[in-house]
Image (cartoon, rainbow, N blue to C red):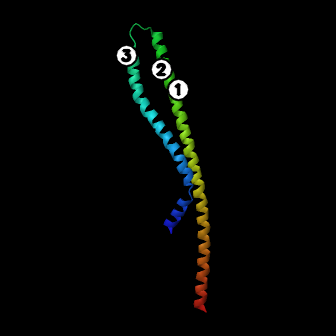
């Protein structure tokens, strides 16, 4: 009975929407993962190249300007990552809320059916007792 209920609930999930949104979720997750993974490697290499390319002839203000530019680039990169993760989270939240609504609907339906069958069982038990007494 439990397996049948689980199958019934699973069959009522809007799989068309889940499947429709799955590629975009996977794409955004992959993009986010690649950007995070690639940024860490690229930043360490770029930092070593940038700082090694400076000579001792540059003034301290020039070095500070270069560092500021690098920090601005990294801040822009972080903003892009935040926007990508926000879009991914929004899509996942929409899917999650849809699934939760369906599960709640089925929980209520299962409760009603359980009460109905408990009532039918009580009536049948009463009829059996009545037949034995008679």
Disc number placed over residue 70 in the picture, else none: 2
Label 1 neighbour load within 10 Å: few <14, some 14-19, many 20+: few
Q: Is residue 7 left or right of residue 119?
A: left
Residue 92: give x, y in percent of width and height: 54, 45
**Quadrant showing the C terminus:** bottom right
Q: Nearer the viewer, residue 49 or 67?
A: 49
**Residue 52 image label:** 3
Please say if 10 is above or below 97.
below
- 1 or 3: tag closer to the N-terminus: 3
* Residue 8 figure quarter: bottom right
Separation (CA) of disc 1 from disc 2: 10 Å
Which residue is denoted by mark 1 in the rendering? 76
CB contact under 8 Å: marks 2 and 3: no
> Where is residue 89 drawn, in percent x and y?
54, 41
Give how far apart the Cα atoms at labels 1 and 3 are.
23 Å
Which of 38/72 is in front? Answer: 38
Q: Quadrant of residue 50?
A: top left
- How crowded pointer 3 is (Cα within 10 Å; few <14, some 14-19, many 20+) is rated as few
Judged from the image, the secondary structure of the residue bearing numbered disc 2 is helix
Q: Secondary structure at mark 3?
A: helix
Residues packed near mark 2 inside 10 Å, few (<14), some (14 to 19) or many (20 plus): some
Residue at 61% x, 83% y is 126
Q: Position of residue 17 (x, y in %)?
A: 57, 51
Contact check, label 1 and label 3, Cβ < 8 Å: no
The residue positioned 61% from the left and 88% from the top of the image is 130
| Residue 107 drawn at (x, y percent) | 58, 61
């Amino acid at each position: 009975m439990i397996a049948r209920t689980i199958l019934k609930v699973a069959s009522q999930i809007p799989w068309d929407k889940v499947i429709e949104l799955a590629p975009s979720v996977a794409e955004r997750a992959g993009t986010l993962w690649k950007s995070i993974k690639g940024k860490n490697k690229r930043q360490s290499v770029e930092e070593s190249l940038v700082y090694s390319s400076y000579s001792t002839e540059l003034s301290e203000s020039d070095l500070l300007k270069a560092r500021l530019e690098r920090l601005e680039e990294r801040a822009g990169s972080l903003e892009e990552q935040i926007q990508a993760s926000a879009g991914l989270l929004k899509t996942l939240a929409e899917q999650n809320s849809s699934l939760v609504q369906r599960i709640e609907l089925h929980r209520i339906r299962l409760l009603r059916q359980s009460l109905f069958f408990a009532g039918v069982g009580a009536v049948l038990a009463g009829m059996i007792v009545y037949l034995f007494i008679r």
